[in-house]
Amino acid sequence: MSWKRDFTLSRATLPAFMAQGVLWGAYAAYVPDIKAGLGAGDGAFGVALLFGSAGAVSAMLTAPLYDRVTGRWALALGAVLLLVAGQFMVAAPVLWVFALALFFTGAASGLHDVVMNARLAGIEGAEQASLMNLNHGFFSVAYAGAAFTSGLAREAGVPVETMFAIWLGVVALAAWWMIEPPRDAPADDGDAEGYRMGRAVWWGGLIVLIGFLSENATEGWSALHIERSLGGNAAEGALGPTMLGLTMAVGRLSGQAVVARFHEATVTFWAALMAGAGALIAAAAQAEWVAYLGFAVLGLGVSVIAPMVLALVGRRVPAHRRTVAISRVAIIGYLGFFFGPPMMGLVSEAVGLRGSFICVAILLASVPLWLAFLRRAERA
C-alpha cells in the first residue's frame, strides 16, 4: 500500500469528503444552541430533522443526472452548494423554516455524497486501489476538527451564523482542488447485472442504513446526552461529537491498512459488534469520561461499516452502472437518517436518551446477520 499514491488518486475526492465533514461537524457542535433557539422539544426537533433525510433521499434519485450534467465540476459545485444551504439552515428563526432549509441542505448533501462515492468507486476499480477508508477517514478528520473548533467558538459566544460563514469561505477556497480533469463519461446501457446487483444493493444498503443511523444518532444527540444527562457545559458537550469524529478518523485511516490483510466482510462483522458495545457504554455512563469512552468505541467500530460495504458493492458493478448502484445503496442507507432522528427523539421523549442509545446498540448487533445475506448475494 502506497499512501502517496492513494493521496494522489484522491486529489479531487478527498477535499470533497472533508467539505461534508466540516458542515456536519460544525452543525453537531451547535445543535444545543440551534434547538434552544427554535424552542423545540426532543420529539418536534427529531421530526424536523426528517426533512434533511427527505431532501437527501429525494436528491439521490437525481444524482446520476446531476453527475452527467455537471461532469468534472460536480464535486466542487456540490460542496459550495452544501455550505450555502447550511448557512440558511442555521439562520432559521422558527422550526418550520429550519425544517425547510434542512431539506435543501440534505438535498445538496445527498447529491454530493452519491457523486463523490461513485467517483471514488470508479477510481478504485480503474486503479485497483482501496481508497474508501482513506477518504471517509478524512471526512471524520474534518468532522472532528470542525466540531471541536466550533464547540470552542460556541463556548466563546460566537454566533452559529458567523461560524458557518467562516466555514463557507474555507470550503469555497478548497473547491478549487475538487475540480476534476476532463474525462469521458461512460455510456449508460441499462441495468447490466439485473437481479444479482439488486440483491447486493439491498443487503448492502441495509447495513449502510444501520451504520448511518448509528453515526447520525451520535452526531446529533451526543452533545445533548452529555449536557442534559451528565450536566456538562457547552464545550464538554461538543467533545461528544468531537470524540466520535476523531475515533472514526482513526478507525477509517487504520482500515485503509487493515483491508489490505483482511476481507471487508470480516472487518465489518467485528466493527459492528464493537460499535454496539460503545453505544451501550455511552448509554450506561454515569460520568462524562465514560460517555466519551463509549462514543470513542462506537466511533472506532461504526467508522468502517459504510466505506467497506460501499467498496464491496462498487467493485461488483460495471463502470457504466456504478453511479446508479452507489446511489441505490446510498438511498437505502440514508433511510437511516429518516429513522434515526425520530427514533432518538421519540425514545428520548419516552424513556430518556440512555434508552435511545440502547436501541442503537441493538441495531448494530444485527449487522452480522445482514452481512451473511450480503456475502451470499456476492457468491450468487
Image (cartoon, grey):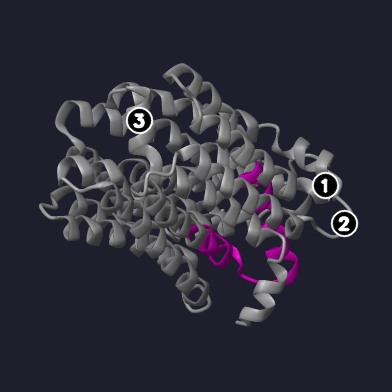
Could you say whether the residue bearing mark 1 is in a helix, strand or loop?
Answer: helix
Q: Name the residue under label 2.
A: 183
Q: Could you say which is closer to the camera, residue 325 or residue 117?
A: 117
**Quick one: label 1, few (<14), some, or many (20+) residues within 10 Å?**
some
Describe residue 268's horizontal placement relative to residue 182 as left or right.
Answer: left
In the image, residue 119 lies in the stretch drawn in magenta: yes
Task: Tell me, for residue 148, which label it has, or none.
Answer: none
Q: What stretch is highlighted in magenta?
A: 112-140
**Quick one: label 2, few (<14), some, or many (20+) residues within 10 Å?**
few
Name the amino acid, label 3: Lys
Residue 250, x across and y down, in percent:
42, 69
**Quick one: label 3, few (<14), some, or many (20+) residues within 10 Å?**
some
Could you say whether the residue bearing mark 3 is in a helix, strand or loop?
Answer: helix
* Of marks 2 and 3, the one in the foreground: 3
Residue 321, x across and y down, in percent:
74, 47
Query: In the picture shown, does residue 210 fall above or below 3?
Result: above
Name the amino acid, label 1: Gly
Q: Please give the name of the residue rendered at 29% of the width and 23% of the height, measured from the top-left corner.
A: 43
Q: Is residue 213 in view?
A: no
Residue 158, x across and y down, in percent:
43, 44
- The answer to whether the residues at label 2 and label 3 have Cβ atoms under 8 Å apart is no
Task: Tell me, for residue 35, which label it has, or none.
Answer: 3
Q: Which residue is situated farthest in the left direction here?
A: 286
Sequence-earlier tag: 2 or 1: 1
Q: Please give the name of the residue rendered at 17% of the width and 59% of the height, measured from the top-left corner.
A: 290
Describe residue 29's horizontal placement relative to residue 166 as left or right.
Answer: left
Query: In the picture shown, does residue 6 fall above or below 206?
Result: below
Q: Please give the name of the residue rendered at 53% of the width and 46% of the height, measured from the top-left corner.
A: 23
- The answer to whether the residues at label 2 and label 1 have Cβ atoms under 8 Å apart is yes
Residue 221, x across and y down, in percent:
31, 41
